[in-house]
Amino acid sequence: MRMLYDPSLKDGKPTTMNDHDGSGFLSEAGARLLEKEKKYCSYGDTVHYALRPKLFERCEGSYLFDDRGCRYLDLQMWYSTANLGYAHPRINAAVHAQIDRLPQLASQYLHREKIELAEKICQSVERGFGLKGRVHFNVGGAQAVEDALKVVRKATKRQRMLAFQGSYHGRTLGASAITAAYRYREAFGEFADRAQFMPYPYTFRAGYGGDAQRTEDACIAEFEKLFAHECTGAWNSRTGACEFGAFFVEPLQGTGGYIVPPKGYFKRLAALCREHNILLVDDEVQMGFYRTGKMWALEHFDVQPDIIVFGKALTNGLNPLSGIWAREELINPRVFGPGSTHSTYASNTLGTTAGLAVMREFEQGDYETSVGEKGKYFLNGLRALKAKHPQIGDVDGLGLALRMEMCKADGFTPDRELADRMFQIGLGHGLDLGSGTVGVVLNIVGYHKNVVSIVPSLQITRAEIDEGLQGLDQIVTLATRA
């Protein structure tokens, strides 16, 4: 159960409602819609993580606008989906044009945008990793993970996988089997294909006093134990056969807390995987498309993947589209032929058009430089907040994938309730910043649900970063007083 903060309550009693104190949540029309939502909509999604769900009417750039016209700076951008900002004019225009020309087409037929988008993704992988391969499209990140599992099982004839503690790969049955948290599987029976979960190098909480090298060494040593002798149940040194088909990795853990690994960790991990014939599957659903300052986050770590899973930011959130890239030897027509996997909306014309427009935007701008510079500026601001607030135990990041870990006053004990209060206060639209009264949209992640992920638009301006830092400062101050 999430601990929630209600800014309309004071000493257990409602305060006077006001449009700008964080408690005037809805217009009259919005209140009527919320009553309908209570009656007709399932609560099985994540809407009701918020104590008082918001109704948003408009979006632009780094901002959302609610049904009263109030402005919210979005520092989570739909879980890193709208990387190029909301209502991007050129991407929107491309989709509008496609709606008038080829809005629908069954996915068993070809269209130009599918082929050109696949080409651009393959070319980006060749530039980043020096590898040739092919792309297969689907509609969501979890569905693309399922396709990756099919490729692995077809190539290796093995169904057991490795993944990380703290991993998140989706909530379909196959993706849940390689997602660490048992709560995603608990209600749905036994998972015979459940992954074996290895520790992720989480330097802040690894128990080595923040020493990244010792954290890396310990995690590698734990992985090496699987192959120490035949009685580990993972490896037969006589035949060179391994029980595991692939290791599904997130270059930076997303839902696990936007954790940046030690620089040398993945190179050592990949070498062990190659030595024991384990494929490396790179899940870039949250971290791909320049979120970290590289097209693919794994590029930072000098490692070559066998399969890449992508989604979310591919279309900037305009139409569901995801996919996998795999090495030629894993996905060429001789080994992964027609009908190997299929979805009605895979490679849909609106999604491929949006994706092609996104890729063209990346080609026209130097996002590697700009995201790196903005990320350093934002991270320096977070470090200043950490020096001011003892409850901020850790800040870190890569590019514009940033984290702020909230703790008790000792700076280490996780404080989930504090993070939840921050989430609710941000949505309350009661922050008095220099640009006016605004709200700040945050997301809470992490092993202990105490990490604020900072995931802004890649096109965020310095002024908006300053506004975000000022908002975070006020939110931490208000939350620690509550």
Image (tube, rainbow, N blue to C red):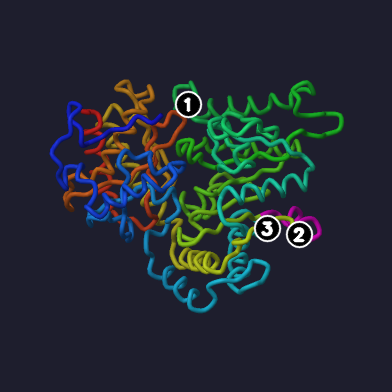
- The Cα–Cα distance between marks 2 and 3, rounded to whole angstroms, is 16 Å
Give the labeled residue for mark 2: 332
Count of residue discs: 3
Identity, as a three-letter code, of the amino acid under mark 2: Asn
Secondary structure at badge 1 equals loop
Write down the region rendered in magenta: 326-339
Between 444 and 367, the one nearer to me in the picture = 444
- The Cα–Cα distance between marks 2 and 1, rounded to whole angstroms, is 43 Å
Q: In percent of the image, x 62 and y 59: which residue is there? A: 137
Q: Which of the two marks, 2 or 1, is nearer to us in this view? A: 2
Secondary structure at badge 3 equals loop
Count neighbours of disc 1 (C-alpha within 10 A) and say few if under 14, some if 14 to 19, many if 20 or more: few
Magenta stretch: includes residue 368: no
Circles 2 and 3: CB distance less than 8 Å?
no
Residue 193: image quadrant is top right
Between 229 and 185, the one nearer to me in the picture = 185
Which mark identifies residue 342?
3
Left or right: 393, with 141 as reference point: left
Give the labeled residue for mark 1: 211
Identity, as a three-letter code, of the amino acid under mark 1: Asp
Instruction: Mark 2 or mark 1: name the one nearer the start of the chain.
Output: 1
Residue 443: image quadrant is top left
